[in-house]
Image (cartoon, rainbow, N blue to C red):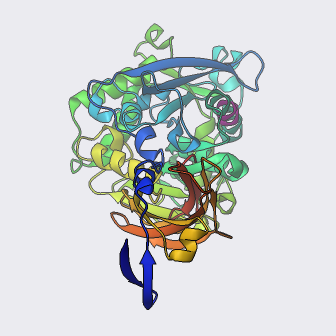
Amino acid sequence: MKTARLAGHSTTVIVMPALLALAAIILIWLTGHQTEARAAGPADPISLEMHTIASTEPGINLSIREKHVAGRTNFRSDRVILLLEPFGVPAAEAFDTSIPEFNLMDNLARQGYDVWALDFRGFGASGRSSVFDQPMMANPPQERAPEAVKDVDAAMQYICGQRNVAKANVLGWSWGAVVASTYAGQHPEKLERLVVYGGMHAFLLPSMTNPMTDPNTGQMKPLPAYQFATPSMSINHWNMQAMGMVPHTPEAETELSRIFLASDATSGTRSPASIRRAMGPMVDLYEIWSGRPTFDASLITAPTLIIRGDHDTFSDDPGFMPALSNVPYKRYVAIPEATHWALYETGAAPTLMHEISRFLSSGRPVLELNYAGVFWANLTDYQNGLLNVKYRIDNHGTDTAYNLRITGSSATGDVTLDSTGGLLLGEIAGGASTPFTLRYKVPGGLSGFRATVNAAAEDGGGAAYSYPTG
């Protein structure tokens, strides 16, 4: 028996030998973020699966690439991400290059993500309508953003069904970012977070629109349904932006060319080799580069990252940010000495991937519960079986956990929590800890029990998380 000073008066604190065993078997829970988001080691294989689903256009199927650490099949919604291809490298494989340092799919997969990449109808491995076998000027420009949004919705329904989640992250590059932003505004309930890489909202780019404008009418010149496009078209634009100040390697250009031509099985039947590239996206881009948005950015409510190279003339500068008027958490990043093709630039790719990863997990609290001891507060509590258990929550992440609160606790052995309402702990900064104590009603004669503590917290974007299961 020991005497301690509690609450300003002498109290006898009795520690029964049987209760020493109790202290050793309090159940410690971990959030699940560390195990599920565990980075894969170099030896961990990344699996590639190809999926084919139906589009909303009869007879046209969509192709989706999927990569994740082999053997891992259980993913929460915040660990599922869909990537949307650009117009300049019109293939899902643009994110899955044979050069490891430029492979965004592998990079995210090794961080514990389930990574999907979609080929829109008319692009890559997805189906093309009979229009692509007809003369180019026989039909209007094909595959504008509204059609692509339908493809995204079909892909998201399939992906969420496969992973048994209600929502996922979406990343779009260039015109793919326009589609991603449009989808995010139309289906806010399906978005965890939105990444806009080299994206566009509305600004003036006369260097691109003037050659496409009829000087007599002031309107866009008629465009074909599709064009025969060569890799040099994108590479020339790349070099135009780089201006010799943003270096990229011959190997990167070769890989871009390979992926570009591989996106159309008929590319080798023409000289020079070329793909049939739908021209609908150019109509969307013309509108955007003329200062006319094609989507309502105020409808977007998911936390959003806008990221671009500082030499990227095709995408908006920070002017996109004010249009995101209903986004609770938004971040703008300009990568130094990078172009629209930052993913393929040795100096920029690591920064691009780091910032994407940081945002996807930014503010998401990585919390661990630790047991810190038990005590009887006073003789009356001891006689009534009211035991205090001390805990500590550690924030192993780099971002603050906001509005952290204990929402309940369950235990074995008919032990109940002697508390009403939740316990508000407030904020815990990254790397910090906070202690708290819960009081349990313990039946007489019990020598030990296991307890699980439930908590909830929010990230910097206001997204809510529950622990230990959510």
Check the picture and name the quadrant holding the N terminus. Answer: bottom left
Vertically, is 357 above or below 269? below
Vertically, is 467 above or below 320? above
Q: Position of residue 25 (x, y in %)?
A: 44, 47
Q: Quadrant of residue 13?
A: bottom left
Q: Position of residue 444 (x, y in %)?
A: 60, 57
In this rendered view, identify the residue nearer to me: 373 or 343: 373
In this rendered view, identify the residue nearer to me: 48 or 447: 447
Predominant SS of the magenta segment: helix
In this rendered view, identify the residue nearer to me: 365 or 131: 365
Q: Position of residue 413 (x, y in %)?
A: 61, 47
Q: Which residues are the magenta region?
A: 152-157
Q: What is the number of callouts on the image?
A: 0
Vertically, is 56 above or below 439? above
Q: Residue at x 51, y 35 (%)?
A: 85
Residue 155 belongs to magenta span: yes
Q: Residue at x 36, y 24 (%)?
A: 257
